[in-house]
Image: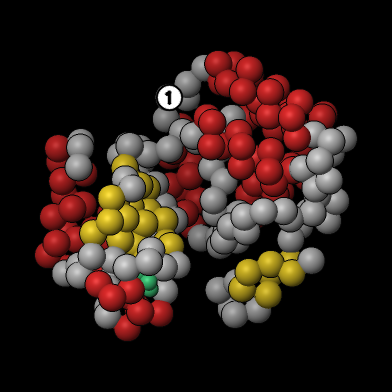
Amino acid sequence: MQLPDGEDGKLAECPDTRAQTLGRDPQPKTSGLLANSVVREAEERCMPDETLHLPLIHSVLEREKDTPGALLPILHAIQDGAGYIPDLAIAEIAHALNLSLAEVRGVISFYHDFRTTPPARHTLRLCRAESCQSMGAERLAAQLREQLELDDHGTSADGQISLRPVYCLGACACSPALELDGRLHARLTPEHLRDLVNGCLEEGSC
Ligand code: FES
C-alpha cells in the first residue's frame, strides 16, 4: 500500500498491512530529537482520567469494528470525540480488531494526525502548499520553529500551543495563510505571525 510522500520525496510504506487505509489520509510522521523531547514533556503533563472516554470508545468500536479496514476510521472517530487517543483505547481497539498492541501503536505513531496526549489549548496550522510557499511560508515556518523552539509538528511543553503544517487552506489568493483555532489569517507578515503567537503565549487566549 502506498501512502503520501515522505520528507525524502519517496513514497512511505505503512507499517500496518492488516488494517487497510480508508477515508482520510493523514501525513506520515517524521522523527527527530526535538520532537521526541517535546512528546516526552507533553506525556509528563497531568493526564485526564481516561476512563471518562470509555463510553465513547465502546460506542465507536461497536459501530465500526466489523467494517473492513476499520482501524483508521476507529482511530479518527475516537480522536474526534476525545480530542486524542487515550492509552486505554489502544488495548480496547486491539482486542476488538484482533490486532496486537504493537500493531495499533505502530499505526498511531506513523501518522502525524493522531495524538496520544490531550490537544494543546491553541492549534496553529501554517499552510505549506505551493502558493503560500511562493509567498514566504517557509520563512514563516522557520520563524515559528525558532520562536516556539518546536518542530513543525510540535506541542509546547505547557500544552499551550501546537504546530501543524497544512497543505492549502483555500486562501491561495491571500497567501501566505494560516489557521489558528479554526480562524483563518491571510496575507501574513512575520510581524503579524509573531503577534498571533505572542497572543497565545502571553494571554492564554486568541
Ligand atoms: S496554498 Fe496556502 S492557502 Fe492555498
Residue 164, x across and y down, in percent:
41, 56
Model colouring: secondary structure
Using the image as rendered, state which of residue 200 and residue 168 is in the foreground.
Answer: 168
Up/down of 72 relative to 98, above or below: below
Q: Is residue 32 left or right of residue 150?
A: right
* Quadrant location, ligand no. 1: bottom left
Image quarter of residue 90:
top right
Q: Which amino acid type is shown beneath numbered disc 1? A: Cys
Q: Is residue 34 left or right of residue 171?
A: right
Residue 9, x across and y down, in percent:
59, 80
Residue 191 appears anywhere in the view: yes
Residue 187, x across and y down, in percent:
20, 70
Identify residue for label 1: 46
Total residue callouts: 1
Residue visible at 43% across and 24% down in the picture = 46
Q: Residue furthest bottom?
A: 134
Residue visible at 74% across and 55% down in the picture = 21
Q: Is residue 24 left or right of residue 125?
A: right
Point out the image quarter for the N terminus: bottom right
Up/down of 148 relative to 9, above or below: above
Callout 1 secondary element: loop
Q: Residues within 10 Å of mark 1 (few under 14, many from 20)?
A: few
Image quarter of residue 143:
bottom left
Up/down of 166 relative to 90, above or below: below
Residue visible at 33% across and 48% down in the picture = 182
Q: Is residue 69 left or right of residue 36?
A: right
The verdict on label 1 being within 8 Å of ligand 1 is: no
Residue 137, x across and y down, in percent:
31, 73
Point out the image quarter for the C terminus: top left
Image quarter of residue 74:
top right
Residue 84 appears anywhere in the view: no
Residue visible at 20% across and 67% down in the picture = 188
